[in-house]
Amino acid sequence: MLKLLVILTIHLSVFANANTCMNDIYFGNGVWNTYKQANVSKKALKKFIRQNNPTRFSSTDEDKTYSFKLAYNNTYGTSIDLIETHWQLYESGQISEGYFSFVAHVLDGRDTEEKFLKDLREIIAQSDADTSNMYAKYQAESFNLKHNVLLVSHSQGNLFANKIYAQLSSSEKQHFQNVAIATPASRVFSGGPYVTLNQDAVVGAIPGSLPGNAEGFGHTFVPSYLNNPNSATKEKIAVGINEAVDVLDAIGCGKYFAFQFVSYVCSVHTDPQELVVDIYGATYKNGETLYTNEIVMTEHQRRILKEIDEYGNLVCPLKRFDIVTTNPEFNKGCDAYIIHDVIGKVEPGSYENSFTCAQYSLKSETVEVLNMMLSQ
C-alpha cells in the first residue's frame, strides 16, 4: 500500500528515533493474572533477558534497539478463563467438540442449556475481542512503526499467540517471532522454539500439547521457569529468545526497509514552512556498497520545541508518514519519493498543487540512496 502525505500546514518542530531495527519484546501472560501480576512477570522477563545476554540487551540500548511491552491477556475468573482456554483448544482442533462441551458444562454449572449457551456466546465474543485488541496493539505499537515483534508467551498466552499469528499478513509474519513457554498448544504457529518442563502437570494434562523438553516441575512463569534451579533449563529459554532475535535481525530487519519520518501537523499555521525531515531505514545494498541507517538519517534526534499552548491545549499532534517530498517551489508543485510501506520500493512522484507540498531539506547522502533505489 502506498501511503501518500498531504500536509497543508506544518510546524517547524521535528523529532525522530533511530530505531529502524527495533525489536519490541512482548510478554503474553496466561490465565488468572491481573494486569499488575502480568506486569511483574514482564519485569522479571526483562531482568532474565538482561542477565543472560548483557551485551545485546544492555540498559543503555533499551528503547534504541529493543523495548519491553505487555500483551495483556485479561482474566475473567477461574471458570471463565478455563472455558475460554478449552474453546481455543477446540478451535485449533486439539480437542474434540464432545470433550470441550463436557468440560465447559462442568465449569459453567448452569441449570439449563439456554443459560449455558448464552454464557458460552459471551465468552467466545470476549475472547475474540481480546484477540483483536492484542493484534491491534501489535500493529499500533510495533508493525506500523516498522518494529519487529518478539512475543514470549506463557501458558494460555500461547493460544492467543497462535490465533493472532494466523491473522497476520505475510509481511507481518516476517517480523514476528514467538518463544513459547509452558505451552498447552500442539505446536508453535510461528515456528519458534518452546520450553515446557517435563513435570509441568498443567500442560501434561492437556490432550495433544507439546511434550516436555526441559528439566523441572511446576507451571508458573517466574518461579518454575525463569527461576528454575536447573541451569540447563534457564539456558534453553535464554538461547531460544536469543535465536529468535537473530531471526528477526537477519531476516526481518535485513529485508525491512523502514523509511519513515515524524512531523508536526499544526492547524494553527496557515503558510507552508521549511521542515527538516529525519529519514531512516534498514541496510540497503547497491552492488557491493552498503548504505546503513546511519547514512540515511539526517539526524538522530531533534528537540520538540513546544507541543502545549499556554492554555494546556495540544497544538501539534504527532503524525507519521511514508512519503518524502523534496525540492518544491511554492506555487509550482514539487517532486516526491514515494516509498512502499513494507518492501522498500521507491517510486517517483510529483504534485502539481503546491498546497500539498512541504519543503524538506534532505542530506545529499539520503537523496543519493533514494535515487539509487529509484533506478532498481
Image: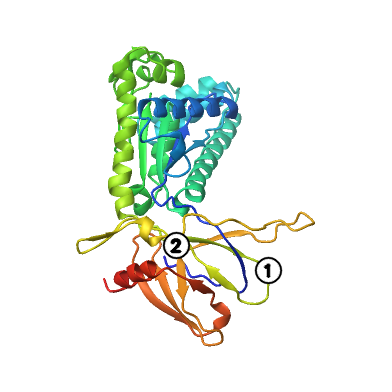
The secondary element bearing badge 2 is classed as loop
Q: Nearer the viewer, residue 163 or 256?
A: 256
| Image position, residue 249 (x, y; %) | 32, 45
Rendered residue at 38%/76% (across/down) = 348
| Image position, residue 86 (x, y; %) | 45, 28
| Image position, residue 162 (x, y; %) | 38, 38
Q: Compared to 163, does 29 lie above or below?
A: above
Q: Nearer the viewer, residue 77 or 49?
A: 49
Q: Nearer the viewer, residue 234 or 327?
A: 327
State which quadrant residue 51 falls in. Answer: top left
Residue at the spot of label 2: 298
1 and 2 marks in contact (CB < 8 Å) = no
Q: Compared to 44, does 265 lie above or below?
A: below
Q: How many residues crowd mark 1 within 10 Å: few (<14), some (14–19), many (20+)?
A: few
| Image position, residue 253 (x, y; %) | 33, 50
Find residue 283 and name its label. Answer: none
Quarter holding the C terminus is: bottom left
Relative to 244, 226 lies left or right: right
The secondary element bearing badge 1 is classed as loop
Q: In the displayed orientation, state which residue is furthest to the bottom.
A: 332
> Of the residues shown, which amino acid type is indicated by label 1?
Ser
> Of the residues shown, which amino acid type is indicated by label 2?
Thr
Q: How many residues crowd mark 2 within 10 Å: few (<14), some (14–19), many (20+)?
A: many
Q: Compared to 46, does 331 lie above or below?
A: below
Asked whether the viewer can see residue 280, the reply is yes
Residue at the spot of label 1: 267
Asked whether the viewer can see residue 95, the reply is no
